[in-house]
Image (cartoon, rainbow, N blue to C red):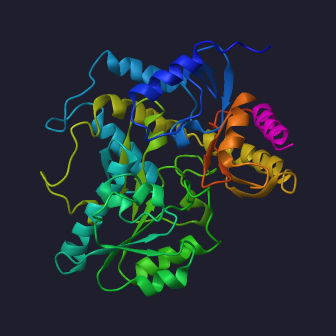
Amino acid sequence: MIVERMRTPAAVGDAERWTAHNYHPLPVVIAQAEGAWVTDVDGRRYLDCLAGYSALNFGHRHPTLIAAAHAQLDRLTLTSRAFVHDQFATFCRELAELCGKDLVLPMNTGAEAVETAIKVARKWGYQVKGVPDGQATIIVADGNFHGRTTTIVSFSTDPDARDDFGPYTPGFRIVPYGDLAALADAIDDTTVAVLIEPIQGEQGVVVPPAGYLPGVRDLCTQRDVLFIADEIQSGLGRTGETFACDHEGVRPDMYVLGKALGGGIVPVSAVAADRNVLGVLRPGQHGSTFGGNPLACAVATEVVRLLRTGEFQRRSTELGVRLHAGLRSLVGEGLVAVRGRGLWAGVDIDPALMTGRQACERLAERGVLAKDTHGSTIRLAPPLVVEAAEIDHAIAQLAAVLH
């Protein structure tokens, strides 16, 4: 049955009228959601294959997470870090244990967590490594996406993210992603950290060559440099392991986490590291009014407990096999390449057929939501609660779009 879409055009028009155009959303106006499905203002249902860029790893309105939020809303929502609240230590301890680290520093957004990691790495470089004041450098990879602050876009290679936002923050060196030789050449006595995504999400779910992450770990250890893994999108079950680094048995010095940590309910991010790294901070040197607030901690603690069961990592692994097999069957049938790991895929469409934006528009017309990036690439990242039949449905709709 085709649902007549009466309210959507007006709602889209209002959004265009009253908001800055920093996004170009699909003309879908979501009003309700449950699990892997959303419903728009006209009653049409869509399979969500974006999951809020991994912020909705556990699906929309996961009952355990909603219950934790409701319970906390009735008790306490905010204190600021001027005081300690009764949810704080539990969250920090359980997340530290999940990461295998000593300490956690909670923030709100992913960009805040990346900024925290940068500040901590520089301070560690001056106080522990002995880098001369003001000379610390951090190595990053081309194609990176770590956030939108002025410091972070200073080392972006994406013109849309970077252009016209200067002057830019110094202190960063950019090397090719996946190139260990270039990384080794870039490290010198001023280098305090290497900041990379174990899988580059915004670039199109780019998986580095086998052995790259262990090589980064070895170089950082040999040269007394911190290895910072931005697992904001790739972590917390998305790829079939708790962290994407786990696929190659690598432990970074610092995890940068966000998105799924808030359970799709509140923004929660964090940096996790050992005491010899995070211990360089002293009171008054860094903070956030909302960072680690009671509501955030209550929800995020339940996220950590869901991950401790291993259920979501197994689902991502098993259903990821199905997703990638289905997508690979379309290579040569409109797709030119498929990349990814677990329930995360970057799909390159033959540009002679259509752009990624056009593909996402046509998928939305068929009841599947996805997101384009960099021309003819689309990203698929369904919630980890998705079912096998729903994976098959999404692939069937993509096949129909391509043909």
What is the total number of numbered labels drawn onto the structure image? 0
In the rendered structure, the answer to whether residue 286 lies left or right of residue 229 reads left
In the rendered structure, the answer to whether residue 220 lies left or right of residue 39 reads left
> Looking at the magenta stretch, what is its main secondary structure?
helix
Res 273 seen here:
no
User: Image point 48% across, 36% down: which residue?
Assistant: 303
The image position of residue 198, as x and y in percent, is 54, 62
User: Image point 85% across, 50% down: which residue?
Assistant: 330
Tell me which segment is drawn in magenta: 388-403
110 or 145: nearer the eye? Answer: 145
The image position of residue 172, as x and y in percent, is 35, 72
Res 114 seen here:
yes
Residue 393 included in the magenta stretch of the image:
yes
390 or 4: nearer the eye? Answer: 4
Up the image or down, 355 lies above or below 46; here it is: below
In the rendered structure, the answer to whether residue 329 lies left or right of residue 147 reads right
Up the image or down, 289 lies above or below 224; here it is: above
User: Where is the N terminus found, in terms of image quarters?
Assistant: top right
Up the image or down, 159 lies above or below 35; here it is: below
The image position of residue 63, as x and y in percent, is 53, 22
Quadrant of residue 174 in the image?
Answer: bottom left
115 or 44: nearer the eye? Answer: 44
Residue 335 included in the magenta stretch of the image:
no
In the rendered structure, the answer to whether residue 326 lies left or right of residue 284 reads right
The image position of residue 341, as x and y in percent, is 67, 54
User: Where is the C terminus found, in terms of image quarters?
Assistant: top right
User: Image point 19% across, 34% down: which residue?
Assistant: 80
